[in-house]
Image: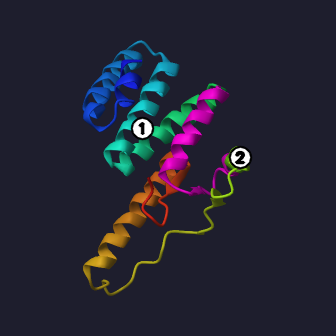
Amino acid sequence: MLGDLASRRGAPALAEADQHYRESLAIAEELLMQPVVAHAKLGLGRVMRLAGDRARAEEYVVTAFMLFRGMDAPHWVKKCSEEMMQLGETFLVARYNPQLCDYLQREFDHEERIRVVMDRRMAERRQRAVAASGERRQSGRRRDEDLDANLRERGFVILPSSDGGA
């Protein structure tokens, strides 16, 4: 609750909110209090988004979403969904999880700007015999590796908007 209050005070209080959420998370994990763990992760995701750390924000918010979904807590799933929409407009779901794809399509059915798509890639991309030239290609490959790892780990990723997300 202290993290929620601090995060509403804007940029100057984000460090304080971060500290409160982390303390809450540590205690909740120790006491196995899953609803509080999920709430702290949602709060940390919001703080990370407001601080400009999109990757960590996505990690925390998606984890909170999955926890609340597993607890069948529709109010908090909706809160996570609202936060996820701030991170991007395209949700890419892993092939192995068609039920999650269906769920997300239902969840965001009322949001015209949100697209939920199933990953249609059949296998890992083929490796080239000759290394690609240029720094741009290396950074693109790294992003693809991160995307693949997150898809395997979480079951879906949120692709940033063309304007870079919120």
Q: Position of residue 139 (x, y in %)?
A: 31, 70
Residue, x 37% and y 30% (percent of image)? 7
Residue 99: assigned label: 2
User: Image quadrant of residue 26?
Assistant: top left
Residue 81 among magenta residues: yes
Q: Position of residue 121 (x, y in %)?
A: 59, 69
User: Image quadrant of residue 8?
Assistant: top left
The first of marks 1 and 2 along the sequence is: 1
Q: Which residue is mark 1?
A: 46
Few, some or many residues within 10 Å of mark 1 (<14, 14–19, 20+): many
Q: Position of residue 96 (x, y in %)?
A: 63, 53
Residue 13 among magenta residues: no
Residue, x 39% and y 44% (percent of image)? 49
Residue, x 38% and y 64% (percent of image)? 143
Identify the element where label 2 is drawn.
helix
Q: Which residues are magenta?
A: 73-102
**Secondary structure character of the magenta stretch overall:** helix
Few, some or many residues within 10 Å of mark 2 (<14, 14–19, 20+): few
